Amino acid sequence: MKQIDIKSAQVGLIGVGNMGEALLVALLKAGAEPQKINFAVRRAERSSELAARYQITPASIEEMAATSDVLMLIVKPQDLETIMERIAPTLNPDALVISFLAGKKIATIESGLGNPAVARVMPNTPTLLGVGMSILSYGSNVRADQKRFVETFLRAAGKSVEVAEPLQDAATATSGSGPAYFFAFVEAMVAGAVAMGIDEDVASTLVVQTIVGAAKMLEESGKSATVLRENVTSPKGVTYEGLQVIAQGDLPGLVARAMQAAADRSRAMA
């Protein structure tokens, strides 16, 4: 049985939209050889653009299924059944199939493709900048060398955490949906500043730089969010008064309910 690594693997990408392109960039950054990468997209102009930009080769999904050591599915969840019907007859039995489809279970893909090695990955949008957070789970047929491939590749996209598949929905509701929660909070802060008379552009600068700085402190200080919050909160001070209002609104409960709703939706998409 052929052992694979980043440089030796023949890779096929089915679907190269915004997220697919970010994953392609990470794959190349990790050391994959462009001449060993094939891809398929629906639009001819997009295909030509990707081939010229990255020196990778377009192919049919059936061809990629037959020749790939690693086949990445980066399509919409509703397209999975059609894709599986097309690639199942020609799929290389030793291939690793990596699914980036929200909510779709490993067992579904194994069943539809004749029980190949399957890894399930849920990235998030900061992957577009190389600072993503990916959640990954493995089917029982995934070999050690295939796991090393996945983990090497995902390191070039940011960070990754392996979880048991039953936790995928909860993890997706945390990091997959997390950027949207964050953006909603930023929107609210900007609106709050504008309501107090600050120009919108100035308010945006104030909020974004504050958030960026706070995130950097959290990442680099080694201190928990709780400690950092306490450090900036003087008893009966300005920040204290603001946090009292947030506490009255039950922010922890609101966030927990939002995350549970997202996890429930992910579970329903299976």
Image (cartoon, helix red, strand yellow):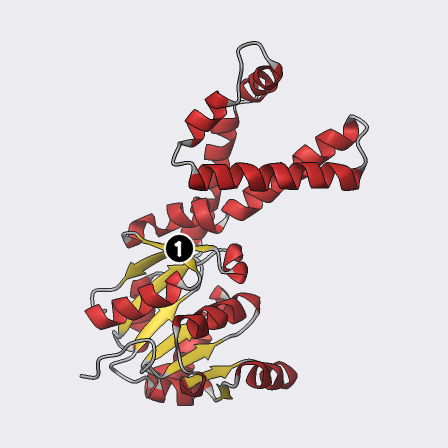
Q: Position of residue 29 (x, y in %)?
A: 44, 71
Amino acid type of the residue tagged 1 in the rendering: Lys
Residue displayed at 45% across by 77% down: 13
Whether residue 104 can be seen here: no
Residue located beneath label 1 in the image: 159
Q: Is residue 169 above or below residue 76?
A: above
Left or right: 88, with 229 as reference point? left
Q: Position of residue 82 (x, y in %)?
A: 46, 76
Residue 162, image quadrant: bottom left
Q: Residues within 10 Å of mark 1 (few under 14, many from 20)?
A: some
Looking at the rendered structure, the number of numbered marks drawn on it comes to: 1
Can you name the residue that lies furthest to the front here?
221
Q: Quadrant of the C terminus?
A: bottom left
Residue displayed at 60% across by 18% down: 245
Along the line of sight, which residue is nearer the eye, 21 or 210?
A: 210
Residue 69, image quadrant: bottom left
Q: Position of residue 255 (x, y in %)?
A: 50, 34
Residue 264, image quadrant: top left
Q: Quadrant of the N terminus?
A: bottom left
Residue displayed at 29% across by 85% down: 92
Whether residue 25 can be seen here: yes
Residue displayed at 38% across by 61% down: 155
Q: Is residue 32 above or below residue 153?
A: below
Q: Is residue 143 above or below residue 256?
A: below
Q: In what element is the residue under mark 1?
A: strand
Along the line of sight, which residue is nearer the eye, 47 or 156?
A: 156
Can you name the residue that lies furthest to the top here?
236
Q: Is residue 183 above or below residue 104?
A: above
